[in-house]
Image (tube, rainbow, N blue to C red):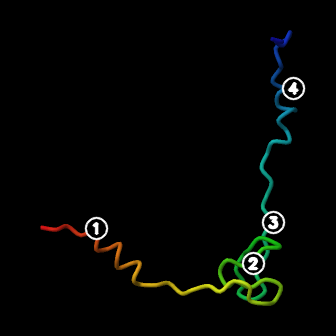
Amino acid sequence: MPVPKYRTSASKRNMRRSHHALKNVGVSACPNCGEMKLPHVACPSCGHYKGRQVIELSKFTPEADSNSESTTTDKA
């Protein structure tokens, strides 16, 4: 199995890794609600994309919250 003949210097190693940094995510404001969203993706807060409603978002249901409270109460 091949093995490197010479040790890779810190400079060469760092030059190789110079393109490994993470890039900033390009976000833009939703024209409907003003929340930040990814480009070319429907807004997760209001469900609009290109000026029309594409995702029907349901409101928060209190039934799901009441079920979690009943499981955490002590039965004494």
Q: Earlier in the sequence, mark 1 or mark 2?
A: 2
* Disc 1/disc 3 C-alpha distance (Å): 41 Å
Residue occupying the point 79% across, 74% down: 28
SS of the residue under disc 2: loop
Category of crowding for the residue at label 2, using alpha-carbon neighbours closer than 10 angstroms: few (below 14), some (14–19), many (at least 20) = some
Q: Quarter-wise, where is residue 68 in the image?
A: bottom left
* Disc 1/disc 4 C-alpha distance (Å): 56 Å
Q: CB of mark 1 within 8 Å of CB of mark 3?
A: no
Q: Quarter-wise, where is residue 72 in the image?
A: bottom left
Circle 4 is placed at which residue position?
12
Which residue is most to the left? Answer: 76
Q: Earlier in the sequence, mark 4 or mark 3?
A: 4
Q: Earlier in the sequence, mark 1 or mark 3?
A: 3
* 70 left or right, relative to 48: left
SS of the residue under disc 3: loop
Circle 2 is placed at which residue position?
42
* 13 left or right, relative to 71: right
Q: Earlier in the sequence, mark 2 or mark 4?
A: 4
Under mark 1, the amino acid is Thr
Circle 3 is placed at which residue position?
26
